[in-house]
Amino acid sequence: MGTRIDIVSNLWKISPNFRDYPVMREASMLSDETFAFQIVLRSEEGIGGQHLAVEGLEGVRLRREANVCGTLPGGPFHFDDYYLKEDLLPDILCDFGKEGISAYPNKNTVVWAEVRGGEGIAPGKYHLSIVLRTDAGEETARTEFTLTVQKECLAESDLCVTHWFHYDCMADVCGAEPFTADYYRAMSPWIENYVAHGNNVILTPLFTPCLDTEVGTKRRVAQLIQVYKEGEGYRFGFEKLDEFIDFMQARGIKYFEMSHLFTQWGARCCPNIVIHDKDKTEEKFGWDVLSDDPSYRAFLSALLPKLTAFLEKKGIASRCFFHISDEPWEETIEAYKAHKEFFDQYLKGYTIMDALSSFEFSGLVDIPVVAVNHVAPFLEAKRKNWIYYCCGQTDDYVTNAFVAMPSLRTRMLGVQMFLNGAAGFLQWGYNFYNTTLSRAKVNPYIDQAGGGVFPAGDPFIVYPGKDGPVDSLRHELFFQAMQDYRLCLRAAQKVGREKVCELIRSFGWDGYKVYPHDEESFEKMRSQIFRLAAE
């Protein structure tokens, strides 16, 4: 056998030795959709420095899928049986260089291909040739594929979507201090990538976010509000916050998620805050001060009226979210209630949201952000909610973006959010390149598991590159899920929401845990939704 080229749906995660995938000959897309497919190359002799091209349509983007370790950790996690068992799985999407493409003998080399609609592609049928050639131009393999572009468009999304952006990790990557001119220049392609993949909410570090930080330690300062001590009171500067908001809005961010004003998992202590006092600058509050300490209450009482006045003048007050602390439980709920009552004095009309998966406490916030494996009582009560997943959502067959999950398990998020009426999505790691609790830094190209503690893929969804982020396969699957949501919306606009939900349920979908573990069933369901949207 010579060199073989197969075209495969993006629903299949193809490891070096995987063979049992169906070959795709044709597909359809809406006019503004990004259609993604995979090109699988395999040769008995291997491939050395050849060049792959897609002919018949301009501008098809090609990236090689590089493999990483997909091994799952031990420890407290319990994993169901819907995971891939291979040690090496594709995740890093690498642009091609002048060296072309190579492949080991009898091993799959996989290329992620994207046709981006809305870029001068007219509706119609396109006959594509996928061709492999040597440096001398000799053709060594070819296959054909037909893509039909419909004139209809996806609906505009009504979701709020955030992956927490870690500003200290960005500083580590670019070598500039947060919120300097060099830092903003380096961060620009990251935020453009962030928005391009369906995110429209950004974590806004009023003070250094007290997230994923070991007790008694601190992370690199990333603070937008300038604080000046004046006698017994405080003066605040919002110039940096103003610049940050302008920067983000210019790149498509719509909503601003204010960083937590109390420490994570219990709201026991305060964030670390840089304060200028005459001739000295100090970091105050932090782990040394309890969250209900009168000195911190006095600080917040001075800050919040000034902050809300600034947000209202800026015209974004209705697009801001405030946090207290993640996931209150029985032992911490009284403290959480006290903080909420305190907030209510100053944040009337603002939205309070937190990760909160205990239904009995859901009345404490305007928007509970519920773990996908705990949503059932919220659905039964028809309680508006966002959803989230993190390292804790490993079983019950729920969706997540771990390296070892089948692509379908990540991709199904969009359909589930439509079916269950979720208003938003939150995940904690767009670019967290630290170990657990930020005890040390990691090389994300070697360690996708935060020092081996998390399931691989949990801490971040993009890799650091020279001129911006390098996408993961999981990031593109998340984006495809967001497109699926918009496709369902367009179909609902045509035939009604309930008809689309009935169609989805007819394929065996219910809540966030029940769905067919079957790529071909998903393809069939989506094709029927597509027909409703394209009519």
Image (cartoon, rainbow, N blue to C red):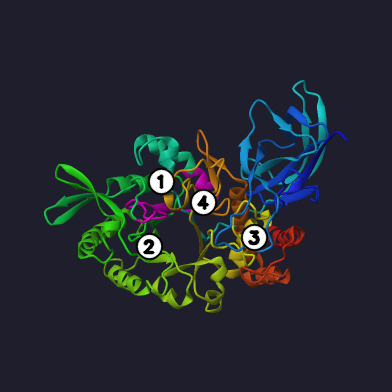
Q: Residue at horizontal 20%, vertical 65%?
A: 294
Q: At numbered mark 4, what does the secondary structure look like: helix, strand or loop?
A: loop
Q: What residue type is labelled 2?
A: His
Vertical placement of residue 34 versus 422, above or below: above
Looking at this view, is 111 or 306 the one in front?
111
Other-residue count near label 2 (Cα within 10 Å), few / some / many at <14 / 14–19 / ≥20: some
Q: Which residue lies furthest to the front in this view?
A: 75
Name the disc covering residue 459, or none. Answer: 4
Other-residue count near label 1 (Cα within 10 Å), few / some / many at <14 / 14–19 / ≥20: many
Judge depth for marks 4 and 1 and give the one in front. Answer: 4
User: As drawn, is 439 to the left or to the right of 391?
Assistant: left
Disc 1: which residue: 167
Circles 2 and 4, Cβ within 8 Å, touching? The answer is no
Q: What residue type is labelled 3?
A: Met
The N terminus: image quadrant: top right
For the record, the magenta segment spans: 191-215
Name the disc covering residue 412, or none. Answer: 3
Q: Distance between the residues labelled 3 and 4?
A: 20 Å
Residue 71, image x and y in percent? 63, 51
Q: How far apart are marks 4 and 1 (CA)?
A: 14 Å
Q: How many numbered marks does the figure carry?
A: 4
Q: Residue at horizontal 63%, vertical 66%?
A: 492
Disc 2: which residue: 323
Q: At numbered mark 1, what does the secondary structure look like: helix, strand or loop?
A: helix
The C terminus: image quadrant: bottom right
Q: Residue at horizontal 21%, vertical 60%?
A: 302
Is 198 a magenta residue? Answer: yes
Looking at this view, is 48 or 527 the one in front?
48
Q: At numbered mark 3, what does the secondary structure look like: helix, strand or loop?
A: loop
Q: How far apart are marks 2 and 1 (CA)?
A: 18 Å
